Structures are given as C-alpha cells and as structure tokens.
Image (cartoon, rainbow, N blue to C red):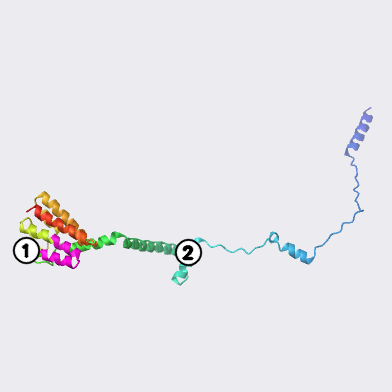
Amino acid sequence: MRYFLLILLFCCSASVFSVEKKVVVYDTSTVLVIKKASAEKEKEIFADKDFIYKKDVKESKSWWDTFLEWLSKLLGKPISKNPTLSYNILKYTFITAFILGLIYILWKSKFIGLLKRDAKKLDGTSFTDLPENIEGLNIDALIEEAIQKQNYRLAVRWCFLKSLQWLNKQNKIVWQPAKTNVDYQQELKDKTLKAEFTSLSYVFEYVWYGETDCNEKLCTDYKTRVEKFIQTHV
C-alpha cells in the first residue's frame, strides 16, 4: 500500500512539472515590401521645423552687461566687468545723475528766483543812492516824470519815498539812507500808522524787488494809497 502511494505521488508530480511545447507558425503568404522615399521627399520632410532639433543658441545679455556696454560706448573705452569696479561706476554714475537732476529742478523752479530776490533785498532795501537830506527832494516832480516816461516801477518807488519823506517831516521816523523799511516800522509807535505803513512797504517791495511787471493801473492805485495815507494822518 505504501509503495502504491509513492507511485501515485510521483505520477502527479510529473504531470505538474511537465511543460507543453508550443509551436509558433508564421504566415508566409503575404510579402512585405518596404518603400523608400525619394531624396526630394526626404529633403522636404526634414526641412520642416518640427524635425530640426539643433538650433544656434545665442547667449542672452543681462541688464548689467547691457548697461556696461552702453556706458562703454558713451565713454569711448571698454569698461571692466570686475564686480567691485562695476559697483563703484554704477554708484558714482547715479550720484552724479541725481545731483545734476536736482540742480536742474532747482534751476527751473522758483527757488532760484527767490534766492535772487532775497539777494536783491539784502543789497537794495536801503536807499543809499539818495541824499541824507530827503526834504530837499521834489518827489512829486520825480513821480510825474517817471509816469510820463511810463516807468511805473520807478514811480512806485518815488511814491513810497514820499511816505518816508512825510513821516520824517512829522518826526515819526528819523530818515537815514542806510536804514531799511523794517527799521522804520519799528520806529513807529502808533499801531494804526505802523500797520498802514507796513502795508505800503509790502506793496513797494513786491513791485521793486519782486521783478513784477508794474502797469499804469497798479502805479495809479499805489499813488492814491500813499496820498490817502498822508492825508489821513495829517
């Protein structure tokens, strides 16, 4: 019985490990013919951009290289690409451009005009071109002469001097050619008189030192104000 079981087990193992040999059959009834494209067709196909895999790649320039190249052309000589030197060039270039731009802006603005005006005031607020004896001047005649010549700016100056002449005559101020309008304002004790004289001073300085176009109407109005100022405080 034991031998029978061994034989049965051997037969089962042999059937499991046996491999069935398969035979591949090729179809030889159809003959494959490989067609080759003509040289013209190949040239046409491979000329298509989809078949071009190799391209000439140009090295792109950075903005810094472009700037250095522009600066080299501007200066007429090559610029080193050394990082330290390039940084210094860039720094001083921008500093110089900033300073020049600031000067241009200030020159175009009214700031320069204000500086010129202040300089004129420092040199011209006093009346050093006039004699110490202001009482001897016929200011009314000088006003009319300036108006006849259509020099309204000068006429305004004579009108203002007329107010100073009158204040000096009334002992409200002490006339001195080297004094300024501020000096005369400080000498006035009457508040109303001081306020009106200060207003006349502002208009005169605006016309005489401000380089304002003084027309006939402005001159006539100012002349009327000065006469009213004198008549009110007689």
Q: Who's the residue at 91% across and 37% down the image?
A: 15
Above or below, 14 relative to 82:
above
Closer to the eye: label 2 or 1:
1
Find the magenta span and give its range: 139-160
Q: In the image shown, does 177 or 133 lie closer to the viewer?
A: 133
Residue 24: give x, y in percent of width and height: 90, 48
Image quarter hosting the C terminus: bottom left
The residue located at (12%, 61%) in the rendering is: 161
Left or right of 51, for residue 195: left
The residue beneath circle 1 is: 135
The image shows a total of numbered marks equal to: 2
In the picture, measured across the screen, residue 122 lies left or right of residue 176, that is: right
Residue named by callout 2: 67
Q: How many neighbours does mark 1 have within 10 angstroms: few (below 14), some (14-19), or many (20 or more)?
A: some
The answer to which of marks 2 and 1 sits earlier in the sequence is 2
- Residue 123 visible in the snapshot: no
The picture quadrant where one finds residue 59 is bottom right
Cα separation between marks 2 and 1: 72 Å
Label disc, if present, on residue 22 of the rendered structure: none
Q: Which of 20 and 167 is in front in this view?
A: 167
From the image, give the main secondary structure of the stretch colored magenta. helix
Q: In this view, does 191 lie to the left or right of 29?
A: left
Residue 32 position within the rendered picture, expressed as x and y whole percent measured from the top left: 87, 56
Q: Can residue 113 be seen in this view?
A: yes
Q: Is residue 74 magenta?
A: no
The residue furthest bottom is: 76
Residue 99, image x and y in percent? 35, 62
Q: Residues within 10 Å of mark 2 (few under 14, many from 20)?
A: few
